[in-house]
Image: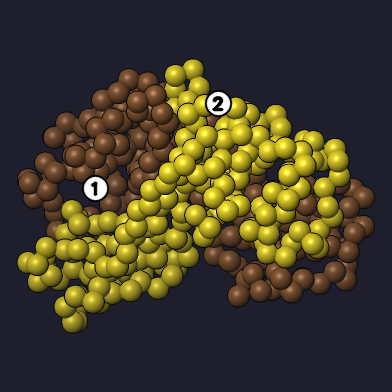
Chain colours: A yellow, B brown
Amino acid sequence: MDASLICHVGLIQDGKPFVIPTLHARDGDNLLLHGSAASRMIKHAGARPRSVHHHYAGGWAGAGAASVFHHSANYRSAVLFGQGHMADAAEKNRYLKIFTDKLIPGRWDDARQPTELELKATSVVVMPIASASAKVRVGPPGDDDEDYALPVWAGVLPMQTRGAPVADPLLRAGIDLPDYVKEYIQ
Amino acid sequence: MDASLICHVGLIQDGKPFVIPTLHARDGDNLLLHGSAASRMIKHAGARPRSVHHHYAGGWAGAGAASVFHHSANYRSAVLFGQGHMADAAEKNRYLKIFTDKLIPGRWDDARQPTELELKATSVVVMPIASASAKVRVGPPGDDDEDYALPVWAGVLPMQTRGAPVADPLLRAGIDLPDYVKEYIQ
């Protein structure tokens, strides 16, 4: 949760599910969201009972297998459940400092502090994390034993930075990186 | 939508909102999702009326302003609405090729094709896009005029690759990159 830069908030409105991407921070066991005081997402998350907030942590990489079927994605994902409330005016400044310092450590003390009007225009939602679940996939693809005999390159392709592919440690020797993967990383 | 690597599907279960991150592809005006035939998300998205699917496109960068208040995020976001149905067995192979070639162009023809058993274990949800909305923020931060007089660095910090900061074109001359931003990009 701390490693991810954005989260996705799930809301129900008029019987329909909505998903709103937003920034988040953490204060102890509380998830913090913030936004314009006029934002539908912020009003909803701070007022509705049974609001559930989900959180997706980035840092994923695609895992390519010799078989189409065993292609997969490496990722870290966390889902947080709870019920939010609006932060008191007195707490707001402290929460906004936590937000700023999470995204750019050291930034709060350098930039101009919020005026009273700016603080009024910004709402902070505090959601005590009632429960949470996490899911992770790491490592090379999991091909069927017989597929490792195929002359097909397999391994991990980092997606976030389009970095250099890491060959599957189980890959047979002498199988070069295909041209389309070389193009992919340029 | 085509540029993003993951999407977030919104579902309602037992009156509560759920958000599930997953891969997606597009076939004309149809959003495609896929997963294990046993997946709750896939069953739900393919069977329930009024399912709404939302989609968040990546490629965002944080915009740092001289004032704390005007810090913002650059991003591209698309939300898609519609009602999904399960793909016929006859169409499934074509849809899975679209998926594979979107993530790693050229991969489908190189890797081993799915067996009949593997196809049975995989479900594809087809959601005709009934409506959609998109939101974009680009460019430098929008500071208040008087804040440009402050001796505070402002500009865009690319988040996805942690690349080199781009100074705000309105920044006064002679304001160096602060140490905490130099640390940030290492």
Distance (Cα) linking label 2 and label 1: 42 Å
Image coords of residue B166 (percent x, y): 71, 63
Q: Are marks 2 and 1 in contact (CB under 8 Å)?
A: no
Q: Is residue B112 left or right of residue B143?
A: left
Q: Where B23 falls versus A123 (above or below)?
A: below
Q: Which residue is mark 2?
A: A48
Q: Identify the residue at horizontal 21%, vertical 32% (top origin).
A: B87
**A117 and A58: which is toward the camera:** A117
Q: Which kind of residue does numbered mark 1 sit on?
A: Lys
Disc on res. A185: none
Residue A142 seen in render: yes
**At 44% across and 27% down in the image, what residue appears?**
A17
What chain is tagged by disc 1?
B
Would you name the residue on which mark 1 appears?
B97
Would residue B82 appear left or right of B76 to someone viewing this image? left
Based on the displayed image, in which of its 4 quarters is residue A162 positioned?
bottom left
Q: Quadrant of the C terminus of chain B?
A: bottom right
Where residue B15 appears, x then y in whole percent?
Answer: 39, 24
